[in-house]
Image: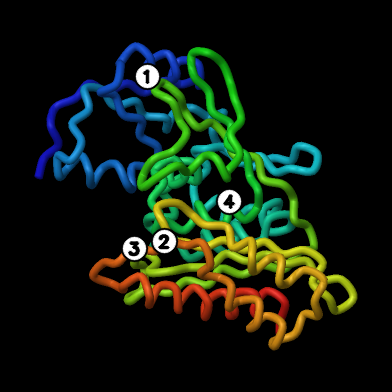
């Protein structure tokens, strides 16, 4: 199908983008890489009056250090995150995850911030960002505010972004020296996750000193597997310890039932994939 008619604007600064969004009103849409929005427009599931293209705003791209955090511009592509040296050193979980997003074509066009703002519960990035305790920096006409990842995803395809606000960057605490793994289960290559697990672990002297685990597609939003984390910390980094801790993975989850899997099977997958993800991270 052909999208409905709309006005188009391509600002060159964040301030101009925020102003354009505010002036356009509730019917406007922001486009980043377009990998999620364009199919929706073509099917006329959305008919915005104006499309605000962030592709010409250079300040929204790139990765930089800021003390003990990495700052990732919202318009940084998955491909650039995947290959960035700072990401590889200080946030290896993100490098591993972006390597598994869709296919090379999508990774070259899709953007880090666009995926997070889309908030698909089956999307690959929300769970790792949650596991890493990242912060979302958003800007609107009233200024800039910071939203923790734990508060950013609020429901299916819904975030804490207010009308007129744009996600401008993501601040990720460094996990230098941590091991990480993203374990994804899907029916065919490049498909959405039926369930996936993001795990990053710091091992010290053969014991698990810190652990962060989050689940993809186990509810309306990404889920932090805090019971697993608590069961891992302070324990030896052995296969037996990890299998035991992974049995807690489905606690507190509300997975969907759909054509790919029912809720019970997803809970089973969460336990199995958590064990695999943590084991791969620590080399057990």
Q: Residues within 10 Å of mark 4 (few under 14, many from 20)?
A: many
At mark 2, the secondary structure is: loop
Name which of mark 1 and mark 4 comes first in the sequence. 1
At mark 1, the secondary structure is: helix
In this image, 5 relative to 259: left or right? left
Image x and y of residue 146, in percent: 61, 30
| Mark in the foreground, 2 or 1 | 2
- Residue at the image position 31 percent from the left and 72 percent from the top: 262
At mark 4, the secondary structure is: helix
Q: Can you identify the residue that label 1 sits on?
A: 21
- Distance from Cα at disc 3 to Cα at disc 2: 7 Å
Image x and y of residue 156, in percent: 36, 47
- Distance from Cα at disc 3 to Cα at disc 1: 34 Å
| Mark in the foreground, 3 or 4 | 3
Q: Can you identify the residue that label 3 sits on?
A: 256
Q: Can you identify the residue that label 2 sits on?
A: 254
Name which of mark 2 and mark 4 comes first in the sequence. 4
| Mark in the foreground, 2 or 4 | 2
């Amino acid at each position: 199908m052909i999208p409905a008619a709309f006005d188009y604007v391509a600002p060159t600064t964040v301030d101009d983008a925020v102003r354009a969004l505010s002036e356009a009103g509730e019917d406007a849409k922001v486009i980043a890489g377009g990998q999620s929005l364009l199919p929706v427009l073509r099917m006329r599931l959305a008919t915005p009056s104006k499309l605000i293209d962030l592709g010409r705003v250079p300040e929204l791209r790139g990765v930089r250090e800021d003390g003990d955090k990495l700052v990732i511009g919202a318009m940084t592509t998955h491909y650039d995150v995947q290959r960035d040296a700072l990401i590889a050193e200080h946030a290896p979980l993100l490098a591993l995850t972006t390597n598994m997003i869709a296919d090379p074509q999508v990774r070259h066009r899709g953007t880090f911030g666009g995926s997070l703002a889309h908030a698909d519960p089956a999307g690959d990035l929300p769970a790792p960002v949650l596991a890493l305790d990242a912060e979302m920096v958003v800007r609107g006409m009233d200024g800039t505010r910071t939203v923790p990842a734990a508060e950013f995803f609020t429901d299916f395809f819904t975030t804490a972004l207010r009308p007129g606000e744009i996600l401008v960057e993501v601040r990720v605490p460094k996990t230098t020296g941590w091991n990480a793994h993203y374990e994804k289960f899907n029916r065919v290559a490049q498909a959405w996750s039926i369930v996936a697990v993001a795990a990053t672990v710091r091992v010290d002297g053969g014991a698990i000193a810190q652990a962060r685990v989050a689940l993809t597609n186990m509810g309306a939003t990404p889920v932090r597997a805090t019971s697993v984390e608590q069961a891992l910390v302070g324990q030896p980094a052995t296969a037996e310890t990890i299998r035991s801790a992974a049995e807690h993975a489905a606690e507190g989850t509300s997975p969907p039932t759909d054509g790919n899997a029912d809720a019970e099977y997803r809970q089973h997958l969460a336990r199995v994939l958590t064990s695999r993800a943590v084991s791969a991270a620590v080399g057990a």
